[in-house]
C-alpha cells in the first residue's frame, strides 16, 4: 500500500510539474567568441529547458541570440539563475512569452527587398509604410558594401511583414506597393515586395528556368 501511495504521489508531482510548464524568450548579446552558442544552449538544456525557434547572428565583432525556450517553472528559474551566473561577458535576459501571440496565424504575409545607394532613414521610412497599414515586421536583415565603382556605399534590406487576424476592410496591398514605389523613386533605390502566392510563383519560375 505504501509503495502504491508513493507511486501515486510521484505521478501527481510529475504531472503538476509538466502542467506548469511555460515558454520564455531568452536573449543574449556580447563579444563574439568560439563556442558561445554551444555553451549557452548547453546551460539552458542542463537547467531543464528546451530551445525552440531561434535567431542568431554575428554583427561587428559581437554576437546576438534570440530563442524561445520551454520548460517547467522551476526549470525557467534555474535557466535564469544559470545564465546570470555565467560571467562570460554576455548580457542575458529571460522574459515571458504571451501564449495568444505565439498561437496566432498570419492572415497576410509579404516579403520585401530593398537595394540601392545608402541614405539616412531608409529603414524608418520603409517600416513606417508597413506600420501605417497595420503590418508587423517579423524580421529585417540589412547590409552595406562598397560599390564596385565610384566609392558609393550600397545598402540592402530584406524582410518579412505579416498581419495576424482578419485584415480590415480598408486594407489595400496595392496602396502599399504604390507608396513603396514612390519612396523608391524619391530615394533612388529599388524596392520589391511579394506576397506568399507571388513568391511561390516566382520560385517556381526560377526553378523551371534552372531546369532548361
Image: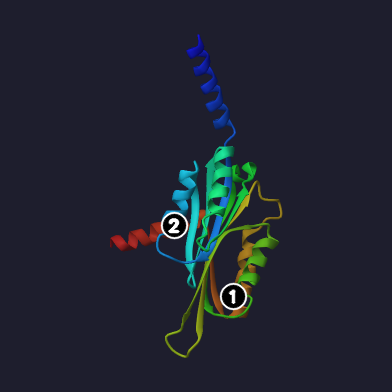
Nearer to me, 193 or 87: 87
Residue 105 visible within the image: no
Q: Which of marks 1 and 2 is nearer the N terminus?
A: 2
Q: Position of residue 85 (x, y in %)?
A: 54, 54
Q: Which mark is residue 27?
A: none
Query: Mark 1 = which residue?
Result: 184
Q: What element carries label 2?
A: helix
Residue 36 visible within the image: yes
Nearer to me, 53 or 109: 53
Query: Mark 2 = which residue?
Result: 37
Q: How crowded is mark 2: few (under 14 residues within 10 Å), some or many (20 or more)?
A: some
In this rendering, the label closer to the viewer, 1 or 2: 2
Q: Which residue lies furthest to the left in this view?
A: 212
Mark 1–mark 2 Cα distance, whole angstroms, equals 38 Å
Q: Reply above or below: 100 against 210.
A: above
Q: How is the image coloured?
A: rainbow
Residue visible at 48% across and 71% down? 61
Residue visible at 58% across and 46% down? 24
Nearer to me, 94 or 179: 94
Q: Position of residue 148 (x, y in %)?
A: 42, 85
Quadrant of the drawing holding the C terminus: bottom left
Q: Reply above or below: 51 against 183.
A: above
Q: Position of residue 90 (x, y in %)?
A: 53, 62
Q: Residue furthest bottom?
A: 150
Q: Where is residue 14 in the image (x, y as percent from the top left)?
A: 53, 27
Nearer to me, 194 or 58: 58
Amino acid at each position: 500500500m505504501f509503495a502504491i501511495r508513493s507511486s501515486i504521489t510521484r505521478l501527481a508531482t510529475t504531472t503538476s510539474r509538466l502542467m506548469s510548464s511555460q515558454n520564455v524568450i531568452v536573449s543574449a548579446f556580447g563579444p563574439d567568441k568560439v563556442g558561445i552558442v554551444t555553451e549557452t544552449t548547453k546551460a539552458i538544456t542542463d537547467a531543464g529547458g528546451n530551445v525552440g525557434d531561434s535567431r542568431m547572428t554575428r554583427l561587428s565583432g559581437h554576437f546576438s541570440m534570440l530563442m524561445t525556450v520551454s520548460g517547467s517553472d522551476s526549470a525557467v528559474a534555474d535557466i535564469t539563475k544559470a545564465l546570470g551566473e555565467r560571467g562570460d561577458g554576455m548580457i542575458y535576459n529571460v522574459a515571458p512569452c504571451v501564449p495568444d501571440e505565439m498561437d496566432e496565424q498570419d492572415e497576410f504575409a509579404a516579403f520585401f527587398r530593398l537595394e540601392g545607394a545608402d541614405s539616412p532613414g531608409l529603414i524608418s521610412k520603409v517600416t513606417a509604410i508597413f506600420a501605417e497599414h497595420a503590418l508587423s515586421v517579423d524580421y529585417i536583415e540589412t547590409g552595406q558594401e562598397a560599390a564596385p565603382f565610384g566609392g558609393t556605399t550600397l545598402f540592402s534590406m530584406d524582410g518579412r511583414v505579416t498581419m495576424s487576424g482578419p485584415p480590415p476592410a480598408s486594407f489595400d496591398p496595392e496602396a502599399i506597393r504604390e507608396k513603396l514605389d514612390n519612396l523608391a523613386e524619391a530615394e533612388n533605390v529599388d524596392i520589391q515586395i511579394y506576397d506568399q502566392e507571388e513568391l511561390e510563383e516566382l520560385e517556381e519560375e526560377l526553378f523551371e528556368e534552372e531546369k532548361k
